[in-house]
Amino acid sequence: MDLHGLPVRTEVPIDTGSAVVPEILDVGWRTARLCAHESYMDCPYYEQLQYAGDTRIQALVSLYTAGDARLVKNAIAQLNDSRTAEGATMSRAPTRQQQYIPPFSLWWIGMVHDYYMYVDDAAFVRRCCWRPGRAAVLRDAPEGDGSIGPLPW
């Protein structure tokens, strides 16, 4: 089979003693590679967009199985570039069409944390962190119970 996708190999051997698990992992790794080119994408056939929710999972697969952080860093940077003045990221990046799925901004924060925990690149993480006014929407929209209230978009 001619497979076009992320040109990396799994670096973590998994031995469960089961004959079925390696086959399942092979399908999963093939899927992960097909959803990774110059950026991650949610589906190699249909939408082909790098959504933050899907991307965090794909990034963890890359970090855990291949130890490869190149696309992870790229995804974090592209989503960082999509941030609004209030600090929210768009749901996907890169894109010309604005679309916001507010929880995906929290997934992006999780991606930055994951990257920090697994990659020795504190300077990059610092560039992604808080800047005055960047997360004002979180500061200015609290409810009485400490949760975030209605957002402007």
Image (spheres, rainbow, N blue to C red):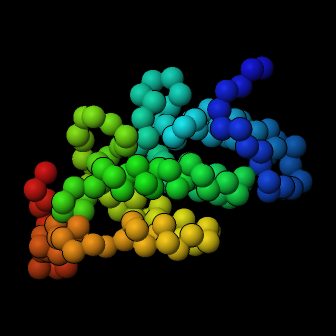
Q: Tell whether 44 sits left or right of 28.
A: left
Q: Is 65 rendered above or below residue 121? A: above
Q: Position of residue 148 (x, y in %)?
A: 19, 69
Q: Position of residue 6 (x, y in %)?
A: 66, 38
Q: Is residue 140 above or below residue 41?
A: below
Q: How many labels, in total?
A: 0
Q: Nearer the viewer, residue 49 or 69?
A: 69
Q: Nearer the viewer, residue 30 or 72?
A: 72
Q: Residue at the location (65% across, 32% down)? A: 5
In the image: residue 132, left or right of residue 106: left
Residue 31, image quadrant: top right
| Residue 150 x/y as whole percent | 11, 61
Find residue 149 and report its image quarter: bottom left
Asked if residue 63 shows in the view, the reply is: yes
User: Which residue is at a point 36% across and 56% down the rendered structure image?
Assistant: 80
Write the residue at 47% across / 61% down: 111
Q: Horizontal and vertical percent for residue 151?
A: 13, 59
Q: In the rendered view, tell whether residue 131 sits above or below residue 38.
A: below
| Residue at screen point 39% across, 66% down | 128
Residue found at the very far bottom of the displayed protein: 145
Q: Is residue 113 above or below residue 43?
A: below
Mark yes or no: residue 24 visible.
no
